[in-house]
Amino acid sequence: MVQHTVSDAILLSYAAGTLPRAFELVVATHVSLSDDARARLGGYEALGGAIINDMDCVDMADGALDDTLARIAEMAPAPRPATRKTGLFPTPLQQAIGGDETAVKWRPVGMGVRQSVICADDGGSARLLAIPGGQAMPKHTHRGTELTLVLQGAFTDDDARFARGDLEIADDHDDHAPIAETGQDCICLIATEAPVRFQGMIPRMVQPFIGI
Ligand code: ZN
């Protein structure tokens, strides 16, 4: 059965704060749009709190608390889900971009498709992709996990349809060529662990220039 939401395993990693930043952003944005994912996340966060409460106490060095708080203050804040659903971009995405959809710096990548890379590090990258209605993406497979969250429009993948708030999870075992539904541009927020593997020669040739 095709899933349209985040898996429990990924949600649990998110609650534990162990996801790479790109994946954290996509999950926070998805949770902002999905009542079901938000309810499941609430359960995992409560579970995490209960586990910490039940842990044995250990003696800490003097100043350990101050050191820890100072380190937390230096860290960039992790994207957190929000419940405000107005506007195209939920709050975690707006915070990552520094504005709403008017703040996105789009770059054409061929076939009428535009992309904007939001963040990239050793754990993976997150990007926005705007695909014209009716356009098929080149067939590809993956190196690791790929999360695709629909923000505007819709796409189909085999017989499954994904619309605003739906999340598709793909990995090394999946090859696909999603097709944007006719009508407005399909805008997706995508996290990948590593560049995808295109199966056609032309997409493979342009890949170094577009970095997907
Ligand atoms: Zn894919």
Image: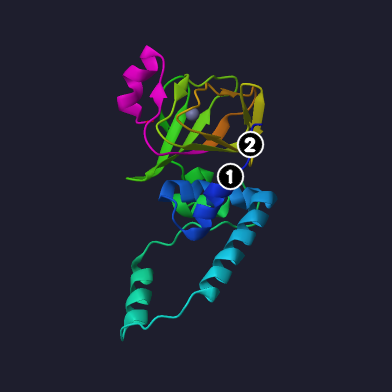
| Quarter location, residue 133 | top right
Which residue corresponds to mark 1?
7
Name the residue: 32% across, 45% down.
Answer: 122
Q: Nearer the viewer, residue 72 or 14?
A: 14
Q: Secondary structure at mark 2?
A: loop
Residue 177 x %, y %: 52, 21
Q: 186 or 108: which is nearer to us?
A: 186
Q: Residue at 58% across / 70% down in the picture?
A: 50
The residue that disc 2 covers is 3
Q: Which mark is residue 178?
A: none
Please tell me whether residue 182 is drawn above or below residue 162 in the rendered image: above
Give how far apart the Cα atoms at labels 1 and 2 are: 8 Å
Residue at 66% x, 48% y is: 34
User: Helix, strand or loop at disc 1?
Assistant: loop
Does the stretch in magenta take in 203?
A: yes
Q: Is residue 112 left or right of residue 210?
A: right
Amino acid, disc 1? Ser
Mark 2: C-beta under 8 Å from nearest atom of ligand 1: no
Q: Residue furthest top?
A: 201
Q: Residue at x 63, y 39 (%)?
A: 166
Is there any visible trace of residue 109 in the rendered image? no
Residue 207 appears at what percent x and percent y?
34, 24
Task: Answer left or right for 210 relative to 170.
Answer: left
Q: Quadrant of the N terminus?
A: top right
Asked if the residue at tag 2 contacts the one at tag 1, i.e. Cβ–Cβ closer than 8 Å, the answer is yes
Q: Amino acid at mark 2?
A: Gln
Q: What span is colored magenta in the figure?
A: 189-211
State how the image is colored: rainbow
